[in-house]
Amino acid sequence: MFQIWKRRFIVFLVVIGPGLITAVADNDAGGIATYTVSAAMFGVASQLLIIPTTILLAVTQDIGSRIAVVTRKGLGDLIRERYGIKLSMLIFILYFIVNQGVVLQNISGLKASYQLFDLPWRVLLVLTAFFLIFFVVNFDYRRIQRIFLLLIFFYVSYVVAAVLVKPNWTGVLSETFFPRKIATNINYWFSLVAVLGTTVTAWGQFFVTSYVNDKRLSADQMRYEKAEVYLGAFITNFFSFMIAVAVAQTLFANHIAVTDGQTAALALKPLAGDLTFILFASGLFGASILGLTIVPLATAYVFAELFGYEGSLDTNFKQGRLFYLFFSLQILIALIIALFPNVSLFQLTLYVDFLNGAMLPIIFFFLLRFAKDKEIMGHFVLTKFESVFLRSAAVLITIAVIVSFFGKIFHIV
């Protein structure tokens, strides 16, 4: 029995990577800002949907992983093959706009983290951007994945910060799932869609299929990949919940509104002390680096897949030059904008993540179409639960997006 579990654990360690990295990277700098701003406005009630969001993240990432293992193709490849180049172009334009907004959030987060530690942010921002480009272009899949996994440990700082503020955990759980006096506030529902959109991201649905292909997982390893995907979904939402707890017990409790992760860290300093400030700033740095690498990489994967170019971390620059150039271009665009001293795109964080949430029903449509097709999936076809759950989520998200969008336009409260 011991030998069986030992072998299973070793296989799990071999498989680990795509699900965990994709899920945790959803909590990038923009995600941290969204959780922080939402929690500063509405406390832990901003995490009302944490359980269904965790299930939704796990189910969709698992479906994407299965599609990749069975077809040996990314989601972008399948869209191009089944629906043609015109629709592919439309999807890519929407995808690129949203993702470039997320890249801008992440470089703004990196800039903010350097400023919080009073470091020469211009020089460090340029050096970091070019290092990330050099790192991705010159390192292979295995080395890059090791760095991604190491960056996840930065998120532990938010867990420590939540413990340091000494919350009443019974009260926290009660307010999370039974919030008071905010059900009719349209801004609250807008923020819930934004929290959903930064957790279950449009780019994450594409990225996991591409990343699984790069890892070259087999059908025999699929159950281990499923376990890794579910573990990743739990861990990422555990981190987001801890961020909300730390902010709710400090900023929300003292009626201090913030617009981004930087102002939140500064506001925490007099309320929760230097250590909490350092923890928040360190977490922001790690999340920014992870997001600033993975999100443009996700866009580069989709660019290569939708238009039929070579795109893999195991190809050299000559073979995958368009893939690597597109990755680099997104970082350089964000870098040029971020170098202006008064520019901070964190203020757009809720809106960018709201757009991410609004795109999810479109992505779910493609997941459903491919995953329920027996010609594509064979006996790995979508289960009835997955189909019903995904359809229900798409309908509910669409309703929430429409209601909160028009509510914001017409200032309904």
Image: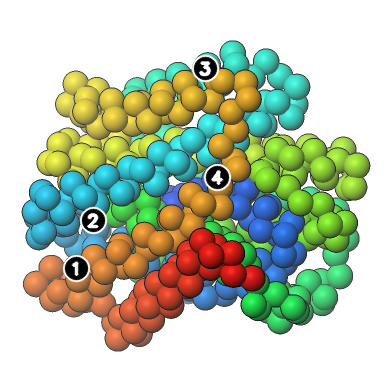
Q: Amino acid at mark 2?
A: Leu
Q: Are marks 2 and 1 in contact (CB under 8 Å)?
A: yes
How far is mark 3 from mark 2, CA to CA?
33 Å
Q: Residues within 10 Å of mark 2 (few under 14, many from 20)?
A: many
Label 3 with label 1: CB-CB less than 8 Å: no
| Residue underneath mark 4 | 348
Q: Quadrant of the C terminus?
A: bottom right
| Element type where label 2 sits in the image | helix
Q: Amino acid at mark 1?
A: Phe
**Between residues 218 and 139, which one lies in front from this camera angle?**
139
Q: Earlier in the sequence, mark 3 or mark 2?
A: 2
On the question of residue 58 being in view, the answer is yes
For the residues bearing labels 4 and 3, Cβ distance under 8 angstroms: no
Q: Residues within 10 Å of mark 3 (few under 14, many from 20)?
A: some
Residue matched to label 1? 370
Q: Please give left or right for residue 68 compared with residue 376 in the image.
A: right
